[in-house]
Amino acid sequence: MNRKQARLRALVWGSPILLCAIACLQIFLAMTKSLSPWKGGGFGMFSTVDSPDARFLRIYLVNGSEETAVLLPDNLKTLGRELQTIPSTALASDLAQRLARGTWTPYRMTDPVRHYQNTQTGNDNETLAGVAGPSDTTSLNGNSADVVKTLPDGQVVFPKLLRMRERGSAASKGEEAVAFQRVRVEVWKYNLDVGASQLKAAKFLEATADAQP
Amino acid sequence: MKAFVERIPLKGRPVLRPVEPAPAAGASSRLDLYAIMTLLLLLVYPSSYWYVRIPLTVLCVSAFVFSALRFDPRFWFVTAMVVMAGNYQNWFIVDNHKYLLGYWCLALFCCLLTEAPEKTLAQIARKLIAFSFLFAVFWKIASHDFLNSTFFHYALLLDDRFRGVSELLGGMTNELMDANRTAYRALLNFDSKIDTVQLLFTRGITYLARIVTWWTLLIELLVAVSFLWPLGKSISRWRDFFLIVFILSTYSVAPVLGFGWTLIIMGLVQCENRYRYVRWLYMAAFVVLQIYNLPFRAILGADSP
């Protein structure tokens, strides 16, 4: 084979070989590191229930015997997605440590009209509605008296629904941080049991991190 | 017009007769068509990351304005690198067709470095289709929950993209679908303590899941084998037919239009000149994909309370 032919062959095969190399790497990672077959360039989409969406996170702030479930903050969603796609104890631990560094406070929401009126009268408070609120697929367990409080200034506070404030960011007026000793991050996976017509979830791994003083 | 007519003396009178464009011109115009379709694909289905979307938009618009760029290998190299850099940065999020798009832009770069770019591009397109389907088949066989039709049970019950098919062919009602969706949310809600939820489905879903499972495996296997087979022999002659059937059947259910469009461009590039109607079938498939994307449920009022 002369040089010209070798060059032509390299140009014809370059792109397909890259496809095969990445797909083989993806298969290796899926077999050894629990990478979801749906991701990573291995063309495993629509082949299994085990997509990143079938791996979900449960996160708890632990204080003694009390545990409070919390939502993953928006700024950590990418890390959370990576954890769902290729779960590992190291990633879970990293996420837990970042969550443990934050300050957790109850969600507060203000009617935008009321918020506007308060700014005019100097009685300003942060409007959280629509900024960092839970998604529409999220709901709170428990009865409404336990989960919602309305303050005299019109703010609605959700004591059981916590949001993370980055360390160093300013607190809103009257905002109180929730005490906790550590954060536990759990990665769960679900499977469909067709015979029993059930969607069954099982814990895949977990990591904890102590709260930063 | 001058280029396409010639004067032929006939009984002393000159007449105009259309002539075939020179092969080189035909090849370059087809290559231009493939380049334009790829640029449109990059523009119409952009990346969700600004650092990929904005450079690609600038590159694509530049290539529309300055047509010479479409034949410049350096342009396609830069485009491929931008797509691939985005994929590398978000490898755990991006879908597989974005990887294929990166390989395709690289293929355009490689083909323009050869003396017969269209022929080279056709060879690369065949290989990319063959290997991507081969890996797709591998995963379907290796998966623990595909061949027993568990995956399609799940998709038909809980994936909204399959909802229309579940209701139309599987006998599912709005109420059953909503009950399953409620159960699903209860399992995944952030403060959920439960680990099992009950799903409801009809016998029709079971039959449908089995049919879709085996159909998907069969058609993907046929595409992979026919594109791997030596050109012009045996099953290879049917490869365009299999690919078009795959596109029309798969994307009617799961409208991943970016993937479908990529496959159509690659199918067009590699189809042989002797079957001219096949080109039209690929173009028809492109139009049909857009029709699939119509909000049929909303049009038919199925989403109204």
Image (cartoon, coloured by chain):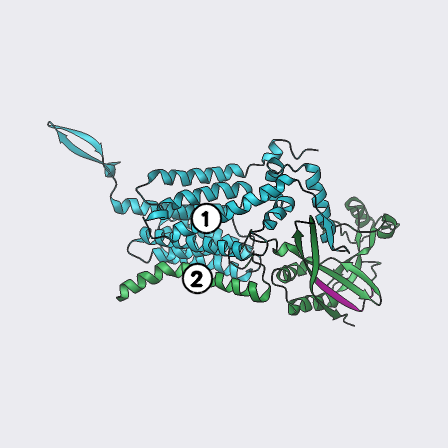
Chain colours: A green, B cyan
Toward the front, the furthest residue is A195
Left or right: B227 with respect to A108? left
Locate residue B114, reporting x and y percent: 31, 57
Question: Residue A18 has which mark?
Answer: 2
Where is mark 1, residue-wise? B262
Locate residue B33, reporting x and y percent: 37, 45
Pointer 2: residues within 10 angstroms few (<14), some, or many (20+)?
Answer: some
The disc labelled 1 sits on which kind of residue? Thr
Q: Give the mark count.
A: 2
Q: Which residue: 49% across, 40% down?
A: B289
Magenta stretch: give its range. Answer: A178-186
- Asked if the stretch drawn in magenta spans residue B199, the answer is no
- Name the element at disc 1: helix
Left or right: B58 with respect to B237? right
Can residue A36 be seen here? The reply is yes
Left or right: B257 with respect to B27? right
Q: Chain of mark 2?
A: A
Toward the left, the furthest residue is B12
Q: Disc 2 and disc 1: Cα gap in Å?
A: 17 Å
- Name the element at disc 2: helix
Locate residue A164, reporting x and y percent: 75, 61
